[in-house]
Amino acid sequence: MAEQHRPHRRPTVEAPDGFAAALRSAVRGEADFGPTARALTTMDASNYRRVPLGVLAPRDADDIAAALTVCQEYGVPVVPRGGGTSIAGQATGTGLVLDLTRHLRSILALDPAARTATVQPGVILDDLRAAAAPHGLTFGPDPSTHSRCTLGGMIGNNSCGAHSVAWGTTADNVRALEVVRYGGEALRLEQGRAVGPHGVRELIGAHLALLRTGYPDLPRRISGYALDALLPEHPGGPDPVRAFCGSEGTLAVVTEATVRLVEAPRARALAVLGYADESAAAEAAPGLLPYRPLTVEGMAADLVREPAGLPRGAAWLFVETGGATPAEARAHAERILRAADAVDGTVVTDPAGQRALWRIREDASGTATRMPDGTEAWPGWEDCAVPPARLGPYLRDFRALLTQHGLRGTPYGHFGDGCIHVRIDFDLLTPAGVSRFRRFSEELADLVVAHGGSLSGEHGDGQARAELLPRMYGDELVGIFGRFKDLWDPDGGLNPGMLARPVPLDTNLRFDVLPGPGRPVDVEFGYPQDGGDFAGAVRRCVGVAKCRTETAPGAGVMCPSYRVTGEEAHSTRGRARLLHEMLAGEVITDGWRSTEVRDALDLCLSCKGCRSDCPVGVDMATYKAEFLHHHYRGRLRPAAHYALGRLPRWLRLAAPFARPLNALARIRPLAALAKRLAGITPERTIPELATETYSRWLRGRHGKGTHIVSSSRVVQVWADTFTEHLSPQVGRAAVRVLEEATGRTVLPPPNGVCCGLTYVSTGQLDRARAVMRRTLDRIGLLPGHPLVVLEPSCAATLRTDLPELLPDDPRSHELAFSVRTLAQYLEEYAPDWTPPRLDRPAVGQTHCHQHAVLGDAAERRLRERMGLTGELSGGCCGLAGNFGFEKGHWGVSVACAEEQLLPAVRGAEPGAEVLADGFSCRTQLDQLAGRRARHLAEVIAEGLEDGRP
């Protein structure tokens, strides 16, 4: 990174002398004070950033107690951290971060009869739900981050989720807690027993009147400390567990929790109700609560980019119902549909249809970070709550306040509980914009209070709202909050700056350290979705951490390396955080030369899965290519970059000598030497070269000297490197299919064209650009004729990388627009053609680049017409072009394949067709499973040869 683009470095706080050594000697867990660990934990999913001293991954409760003892001795503050998805800044801090996700992930007990489970704080919510499911039970609260949030984090924030109208907040579902105070003292909290440290009972007794009258009455009151739970008249007696939930790590660290489980409905149905506008939907929501639905969720049209499956309307309510049978759940939903005064409505009982609709809602925390015009939007006023009966008027006043400040936002959320989520297009990059952020925050706080609401209805106060708590509770009650905090934590060592004595809401903004407007970072890609601004591209990651899902999300791809290693540095979010810190220049100080960023990106497979699966469209494959370009500029590269990154050139030179080279590659000592020199892992087999390339075969097929003139009766097929030199049978099959289906002639490809894929993936962007320009000079696209590309990775490169590396060349956009897969071309240009009917099951892999960039809807429809049944695997095959061949990547490559692809193929029915359009996927199956997979073109061509109808 050029020095003139570095923002001013702010000094970071160093650990006290002797602290690191004392901590390491006291605990068994891993303590890391290096730049990578610190950089990964500077931010959560909020607008805030604080640089910690280090990160500890404790192994057990004793480790936590020992660490808190050492931290008290050295005066080091502590921040407990779960999934890092907090939206108000409470999972960031300047001291020691306790990473509770690495080791403390056990479900210690599950009692179906008592309907309770005892868990460690790092247990992922979905893991608990999966363990409870065989008993017909679940944990009620279910925030949209359920696949990666932890029980400890949910307790800290008093999380809720979509089903709180039925099952309440986390505080409603926790029975007992084991906690450790700053200094190491362990306490057990249970309802009706001791209310906490010495002095708490007296504090409550001295302020009974205020505590009885100072809290608003609404289901989603999350703000402040719930001291009213300690009143003597509280049902069941004073409840220290409820008072502790929502304390945001400021009182003690949870080491164990006993939680309540609820009966999960055996069947569910979804009534989707359309309304004329957002206020109409909000006003209708309270009237549905007497029907005892499981959820009443709302959203407006400005959040929904593709309203597929939604009934007519400009706003919608999602009302989920349950039942012992599908018929009972459906009948319940239909009663709600009849009772609702909606413009339109429908009942969805198909589980896949319900999941598709819920995905729109669950991804909203990410998709809402971009307005329809691409403008950035941010949290900060993410989850205010008002009494449900006041929601309609509140939303009208809220929209008016936005307009008054010249701001835009997209409200959505838990309409049945009066809780609204919204991302707003604050300008947090300039002093004037930050000032407006503060003024709006203050006025919105007053508006929420005027409607009888809570500043936070789900995600906690953190830094975003705690400063404004006096507007909601008054100075006297907030003063009691401070005294309550002091009784628990007299040294002020636990998450200082949150809740009690908070830091100002407009400090510690994570954007302060990035290159600002007018100081762009000099980069190679165009970043069209971010105005050409690399810092803007890195800002895309808002930390919702969908990439941290460790179980395969069906057809999704993101993030294969994280699912293998479980390390934050190998998630899309982790890599984005490191790039952010690289641009900041405080923790990671070497800019583009950073070894920390390089090492984290080393296990990125460039699968592009995040481009489609990340709710905000982070494109780590592009960021990796950009980084590698700058990191190695003017320096010696790894051997694999020269061997595999320039593969098209070597294969063109090797083509005339394919037979002797194949023979030499079968001699083990020679092959081992070649792999060592080329930086290829020794476990890999070198693929065999084609003795006749695809283009040579096609030209021979047309006859020497024959020249095909341009006409409307031709098809252009891209001769990608892999089809040309390594699997020409795919090209031959495609020619057979295309000419049969369309009656058109496939043109021989021009010589020397290449998409530049291997140069891009290894960050050789100057060479990639030169290769692409040469291709544009030679390709000679016929006007109005699409370009059929058989290799998905090459198609994705032409569709995205080409125009983003050559944004000023109109030919690049023309070529990108022309790209079609085989199935897309057949659907568009031979819609009446009947493919051969094969009627057999199919397994295999949808190429990750196709999933991310091109989509596979046409392929699915074509397989259905052919009678190829079953779903192809999602995820990534793990070979991923050069990645799986490079030395040091073998273990991760195999583990990625073992996640979905290999088990699916091994478990396939006899006679099942193994499909894989990508050369990498076919190679991985051949080398790891000994199974020959085929491109769809080969399967169709075989059917044609067999004369199948």
Image (cartoon, grey):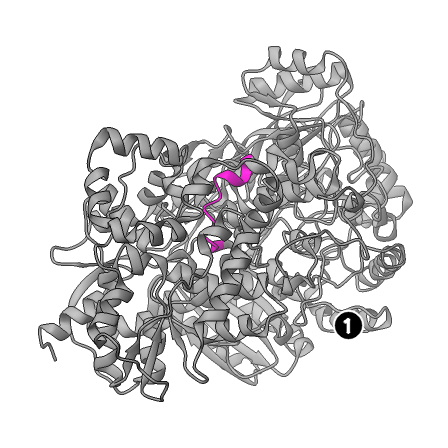
> Residue pushed farthest left?
946
Disc 1, SS: helix
Q: Could you tell me residue 362's position as x and y percent?
A: 54, 60
Q: Quadrant of the N terminus?
A: top right
Indicate the quadrant where residue 450 lies. bottom right
Q: How many marks?
A: 1
Can residue 141 be seen by looking at this rendering?
A: no
Vertical order, 798 against 518 (above or below)? below
248, 450: nearer the viewer: 248
Left/right placement of residue 327 relative to residue 281 reads left
Q: Could you tell me residue 480's position as x and y percent?
A: 84, 37
Vertical order, 377 against 134 (above or below)? below
Q: Could you tell me residue 51's position as x and y percent?
A: 73, 34
Q: Is residue 149 magenta?
A: no
Amino acid of disc 1: Arg
Which segment is the magenta one? 599-609
Indicate the quadrant where residue 70 lies. top right
Q: Quadrant of the C terminus?
A: bottom left
Mark 1 crowdedness (10 Å alpha carbons): few <14, some 14-19, many ≥20: some
Q: Which residue is mark 1?
A: 399
Left/right placement of residue 478 relative to residue 908 reads right
Can residue 863 be seen by looking at this rendering?
A: yes
Indicate the quadrant where residue 219 lies. bottom right
Residue at 77% x, 29% y is: 200
Left/right placement of residue 762 relative to residue 444 reads left
